[in-house]
Image (cartoon, rainbow, N blue to C red):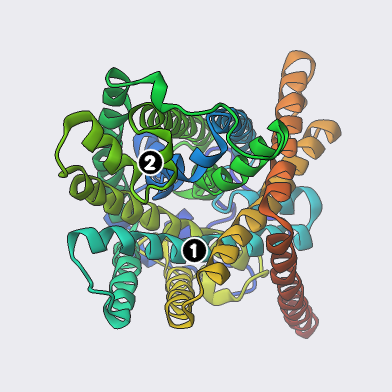
Amino acid sequence: MTTVTTPDTGTPTGTPAGQDTQHAAIPGGPEGDGADGGRHARRFGLPVATALVMGNIIGGGIFLLPASVAPYGTISLVAFAVLTVGAIALALVFGRLAERHPRTGGPYVYAREAFGDFAGFLSAWSYWITAWVSNAALAVAAVGYLDVLLPLHGSVAATIAAALAIQWLPALANLAGTRYVGAVQLVATVLKFVPLLLVAVGGLFFFDADNLGPFHGSDAGALGAISASAAILLFSYLGVESAAVSAGEVRDPRRNVGRATVLGTLGAAALYLLGTVAVFGTVAHDRLAESSAPFSDAVDAMFGGTWGGTAIACMALVSMVGALNGWTLLSAQTPYAAARDGLFPRAFARRRRGVPTVGVLVTVVLASLLTVYNYTVGSEGVFETLVLVTTFTATVPYLLSTAAQIYFLLSGRRDRVRGGRLLRDGVLAALASGFSMWLVAGSGYAAVYQGVLFLFAGVVVYAWMSARRDRAADAV
C-alpha cells in the first residue's frame, strides 16, 4: 500500500494527535518511536543539506584523481566536463522528484511510487550495497593518509584497528542524533573545502603550461581515452542524491532538497575541476603520473619544502571522515524507508534521536567485515573490483529514478506540466538517464557481473519479505 503524504512535510497522514510525525507508527508493525524526538532530531536547513551533498560527493577521491587520470593526458578534463554535466542533470532530476515526493528514502520512494514494490526494493537494495561498500573503501583509503601522520609500521593489526576506528567514529556520531550528524558534516565540509579551494585557486598562480604533458597520452583513441578516464572518475560523483535520500530530515524539503542538491553538486564540481587543473599545471606530467599524493606534490612545487604531505594528509582525513559521516546516515535512511513499507525487516524502521539505529549498526558492521576481509586476504584487486561494483549498483537507483521522472511526466501523475517546463524536465530526465547508462558501461564487465549477482541475492530477500508480508495479511 502506498503511503499518503501531507503537502507540507511529506510525513504519513493520519498521525495521532500529539505524536511526533517523523516517527509515526509503521503500518503492520510496532509503534513508531516518537518518544525519541526532541532536540537531537532537529531537521537540516539548506546550509547543512548542501554540506551533506558536498561532503558525500567530495570524499577522498579529490586527493587522488589528478594522478589517476594523468596517464590519459589532459583529455581527461573533457571526461570531467561530461561527467559534471551529467551529474548536474541528475541533481536537477532529483530536485524535481523531491518536490513531488519530499520523503526520506529518495530513489527508493520514486521507484516505488512509479513502478511498485519490486522496483522500490531493488532501488533500496542496490543503494544500500553502494553505501556500505563505499564506506569500507573510504576507510581503507583514509588509513593510507593516517599512515603519513601516525606511521603504522606496516602492522596488519594496527592498520585494521585504525580502519575500524575511522568507520566507527562517524557511526557513533550518527547514533548520537541527526543534530550531531549535521554539525559534524558542516564542520568537516568547511575544514576540507577551504584548504582545497586555496590549493586549487593558488595553484593557478603557479600554473605552467609545460607541465600539462600531451593532450592525449594513451594508446587508445580519443573516445577510448575519455571513457577510460571517465571510468576512474565515476566513483567521485556518487552522492548527488544525498539530500533527496534524507528529505524527511530536511526543513521545507520541497524547496530545500532541490536547491541543496544543485548547489552541492555545483560546488563539488567546481572544486574538482579547479583542483585537477591546478595540479596538472603545477606538477610535471611524468612525475604526476607516478605520484601517490598529487596535492602534496603540488604544494611542494608551489611553496617549496616538504610540509605539503602532512598538511594534505590532514585534509584528506577530514574529508574522508566527513564523507563517512554522511554516507553512514544515508546508508540507514533507504532501508528505513523500505522497512516502513514492509520491504525490509521491520528492525530497520526503528529510530532513536532521529536516526535509524539498526540501519547504522548493520551498515557499519558489514563495512567493518569487508574491511577486515580486504586486509587479511591482502588482494587489492578484489577490493578494487568491489569499489567498481558500487559504481554499478549506484546506477540501478539512478536509472530507476530517471525512469520514474519520465513516467511521471508522460502520465501526468502528481501534477500536470505542459509546455516549456515539460520539455525542460523531459530533456533533463533523458540526459540523466543517458549519464546513468554511461556509468554502467564505465563500470566494466567484471563489476557489472558481480553487481548483478548482488542484485540477484536481493531478489531472494525480496521473495522472503513478500512471503512474510502476505502470510501476515492472510492471518488478519
Position of the C terminus by quadrant: bottom right
* Marks 2 and 1 close (CB-CB < 8 Å): no
Position of the N terminus by quadrant: bottom right
Whether residue 10 is visible:
no
378, above or below 196, in the image: below
185, above or below 257, in the image: below
Q: State the residue position of label 2.
A: 287
Distance between the alpha carbons at the discs numbered 2 and 1: 41 Å
Return the mark for residue 332.
1
Residue 67, x across and y down, in percent: 44, 43
Residue 241, x across and y down, in percent: 55, 44
Residue at 74% over, 14% down:
420
Residue 388, x across and y down, in percent: 60, 58
Q: Secondary structure at mark 1?
A: helix
How many residues crowd around disc 1 within 10 Å: few (fewer than 14), some, or many (20 or more)?
Answer: many
Residue 350 shown left or right of residue 279 in the figure = right
Q: Number of numbered discs present?
A: 2
Q: Secondary structure at mark 2?
A: helix
What is the three-letter code of the residue carrying label 1? Ala
Which sits in the foreground, 67 or 384?
A: 67
Residue 140 shown left or right of residue 196 in the figure = right
Which sits in the foreground, 100 or 111?
A: 111
Q: In the figure, residue 187 lies in which quadrant?
A: top left
What is the three-letter code of the residue carrying label 2? Arg
Residue at 39% over, 50% down:
60
Residue at 72% over, 20% down:
424
How many residues crowd around disc 2 within 10 Å: few (fewer than 14), some, or many (20 or more)?
Answer: some
Residue 476 shown left or right of residue 187 in the figure = right
Which sits in the foreground, 8 or 367?
A: 367
Return the mark for residue 143.
none
Q: In the figure, residue 464 lies in which quadrant?
A: bottom right
